[in-house]
Structure formats: structure tokens, C-alpha cells
Amino acid sequence: MRTITHAAPAAANFSFFPLLAVLIWTGNTLVTKAAAVVIEPAAIAFYRWLLAGLVLTPFVLRAVWRQRAMVAAHWPKLAFLGCLGMGMYQGLAYEAAKTTSAIHMGVVVALMPLFSTLLASLFAGEALSASRLGGVGLSLLGLLILCTHGQPATLLHGAVQLGDGLMLIAVASNALYGVLLKRWALPLSTWQQLYVQAGFGILMLLPFWWLAPASPITAQNIPLILYAGIPASIGAPFCWISGIKILGPARASLYMNLLPLFVALAASTLMGEQLYAYHAIGGTLALAGVWWGQRVVLSPA
């Protein structure tokens, strides 16, 4: 009896990892929105990964150097992953923050598991069930209500924020990143892959930073850069990977459903964003679609 009593709390403690990752990403969503008025999107995206790379260098560079032949053999895949996850996803998210709210961004990011399911069926040969298709339809309905502020008829007049569309592309690119990362199964450790991909991401972002309007580091934006570069780029991935190792990807992905709730509460409290009925309706439908689309995957566990 003693063994059983102690095993249950231990298993529960492991679930703290994905929850902490989601909490860090909640903060990063607010940072992304706050950065829209104090620093250029290309600048914070570049500074973020440059900082993450510098912090990781003392711990990872030696191991990457020992694996340089492996890195050279797989550099096209590593470069593409870096462009998707570090370049496109982050760069588009910062640009989207100019014309959409943190609450909208949180709901769209929570669609990541569903996007991953769809892309896995296209690129990894996973079956796309009727349940998953139903989940897609329900989530899209929720997004439609959310992005049109509860008035879908405005689509006929083009009255949808550009930022919402950019966030959809950003989330789709990051979902594709996850699918390809799993499919390719590169023979490098997680930290080695993250380090090399960050390097390629920096190279991709460099010309955009160089050509963008000057946006130096200031007292106003340096806390945002530090948060994006260390907790969000290093801490959250570590917690997420740890959670997946304990719970598995299907169970861990459920924690992403908490992101819109956390972002809505934080944005309304800390940033003064107003909550409306269409937020509740659209967000609930979107998250219900995510649950419906994943329930067949989760049921065997």
C-alpha cells in the first residue's frame, strides 16, 4: 500500500512540466503583444534567438562540434526546421501582434495540436478520421466567430484583422515544424538540434533585421528581449520536452488547451484588454474542436 500511495503523487508531479511550459508561453504571448509598440518585429525575433544561442553556447557548442559530421550530413533539414520554428513562427507572430490582440493570439496558438494532426495526415501518413475532420470544422467555426468579432458577415467586406491571418500562418508553420521533427528523427540530442536550428534561424532573420527600420535595444524593450530569449526560448522547450517524455505527446498537448484561458485572464488583468461574449463563444468552440479532434488519439491511454 505504501508503494501505491507514493507513486500517485510522483506521477502528478511530472505533469507540472507541460503546465509550466504553457505558463511561460502565456507570458511570451503578452511579451509579443507588448513588443509591438517598442521594438520592430524583425529586431526582437533576431535578438531573441541571438540571445538564446549565446546562452546555450557554453553548454552545447562542444557537443555540437563533436557531432559536426552528423550536422553537416543533415544540415538542409536542420536549416529548414530552423526557418520554420525560429524564423517564420516567431517573426510572423511579432508582426501579427501589431494588428491583433493577445487574446486572439492565445486562441490561435491553442490550435497547434489540431494543425499538427492535419499536417501529420498529409506528411506522415497518419489516418484522418471523421472525428478529426469534425474537430477541424468546429475549430474553424470558433475562429471565424473570434476573428470577425462575432459578425461572420464582415468577411464579405474584408473586415478581418491581418494579424489573425498571420497568426494562423505562424501556427501552421510551427505545427509543420513539429511534424517534420518527429518524422525525420535526426540523430542529434534535443539540445543539439535546438542549438543548430537556432543558428540557422538567426541566419534567416539577419537580413530582415538589417533591412528593417533601426530598432536598438533600450531600457523599455530589453526586459521583453530577455524574457523571449531565455524563459520562452530555452526554459519552455525544456519543460515541454520533459513533459512529453513522462506523459507522451498526446496527453501533454492537452495542456495547450489552457493557453487561451491563461492569456485571456492575463491580458484582461495586466494589459487592460476587454473580454466580450464572442471571445467566450469563439474560444469555446475552437477548444471543443481541438478536444474532439484528439479524443480518438487520447482514448486508448
Image: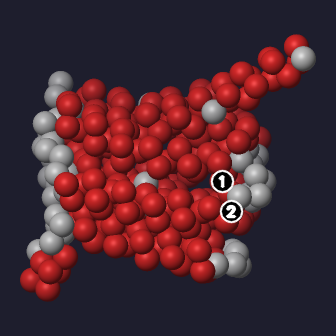
Q: Residue at x 41, y 45 (%)?
A: 259
Residue lying farthest to the front in this orientation: 1
Along the horizontal axis of the image, is 116 left or right of 52? right
Along the horizontal axis of the image, is 272 left or right of 74? left
Disc 2 from disc 1: Cα separation: 7 Å
Res 215 quadrant in image: top left
Describe the element under mark 1 as helix, strand or loop. Answer: helix
Along the horizontal axis of the image, is 225 left or right of 243? left
Q: Nearer the viewer, residue 246 or 289?
A: 289
Q: Nearer the viewer, residue 86 or 160?
A: 160
Res 216 quadrant in image: top left
| Residue 40 appears in the picture as rendered | no
Question: Are the two marked residues, 2 and 1, in contact with CB atoms closer than 8 angstroms?
Answer: yes
Q: Residues within 10 Å of mark 1 (few under 14, many from 20)?
A: some
Along the horizontal axis of the image, is 111 left or right of 39? right
Q: Which mark is residue 297?
A: 2
| Residue 152 appears in the picture as rendered | yes
Which residue is identified by label 1?
250
> Which x, y percent locates residue 186?
74, 57
> Which x, y percent locates residue 29?
32, 43
Residue lying farthest to the bottom in this orientation: 156
Q: In the image, what residue type sits under mark 1? A: Ala
Q: Earlier in the sequence, mark 2 or mark 1?
A: 1
> Which x, y percent locates residue 228?
37, 37
Residue 151, compared with residue 215, is above or below; it is below
Q: Which mark is residue 280?
A: none
Q: Residues within 10 Å of mark 2 (few under 14, many from 20)?
A: few
Q: Quadrant for the N terminus, please.
A: top right
Residue 84, compared with residue 224, is above or below; it is below
